[in-house]
Image (cartoon, rainbow, N blue to C red):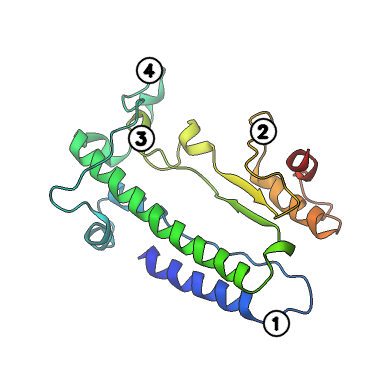
Amino acid sequence: LAHDVDEATMNAGIEFLKRKHDKPFLLVVSFINPHDICLPAGEDSPLLSDVWKKYQPAAGANTVPLPVNFAKTAGGLDNVQRPKNDTWDENQWKKYHYAYYRMVEDVDQQVGQVLAALRQTGQEDNTAIIFTSDHGEGLGSHRWTGKMMFYDEEAAVPLIVSWKGVTPAGRIDREHMVSTLDVLPTICDYAGIQAPPAMRGESLRAVIEK
């Protein structure tokens, strides 16, 4: 299960932060979940039973409402191959939602422990933190799962940059379109070094701090 890998990843990140560092460092803590939510769409996966055993709702548990755009979207996307779970009824979709949010809770807790270690080791004030993802999740919008379409739910991912005392707290920018290609040039800018010439992205520092 990805949860087990993520637990080990979290512990490795915390152990790294607790070491003595004489030079600036770059730490990447890459969690897999909630990617396991994709498994119920692939009914042949050997991990499917393990995923549901851990994350499915218990009998009588409250499930979250389906998204307001749950219905298939008119406009031509039905001519592509749809996920296997396209035949699910609404109850199955609600269970899928439930499992997804339980996975997110796991990752929230793991990210929180890494940030706590950063704080406890006295490095928070001198560390830029970037939180992002490689793709989103359909999660039932347009009756879709996974990442195979350019719907907002799948193409729009979180990009949070936080440096205590440097970046504005709580500011949300809805004006600029950015890409994960911009992450490395942004890291280089905050580190005070030149980004590799081959990088196609641009530093977001000026946008972040304006």
Q: Earlier along the polypeptide chain: callout 4 or callout 2? A: 4
Q: Residue furthest left?
A: 59
Q: Earlier along the polypeptide chain: callout 4 or callout 1? A: 1
- In depth, the one of 86 and 19 nearer the eye is 19
- The crowd level at tag 4 (other Cα within 10 Å; few <14, some 14-19, many 20+) is few
The mark lying in front, picked from 1 and 2, is 1
Mark sitting on residue 20 = 1
The answer to the question of whether label 4 and label 2 lie on touching residues, with beta carbons closer than 8 A, is no
Q: Which residue is mark 3?
A: 144
157 relative position to 23: left or right: left
Secondary structure state at the residue bearing disc 2: loop
Q: Which residue is mark 4?
A: 74
The answer to the question of whether label 4 and label 1 lie on touching residues, with beta carbons closer than 8 A, is no
Secondary structure state at the residue bearing disc 4: loop
Q: Quadrant of residue 156?
A: top right
Q: Amino acid at mark 2?
A: Met
- In depth, the one of 138 and 131 nearer the eye is 131
Q: Which residue is mark 2?
A: 177
Q: Earlier along the polypeptide chain: callout 4 or callout 3? A: 4
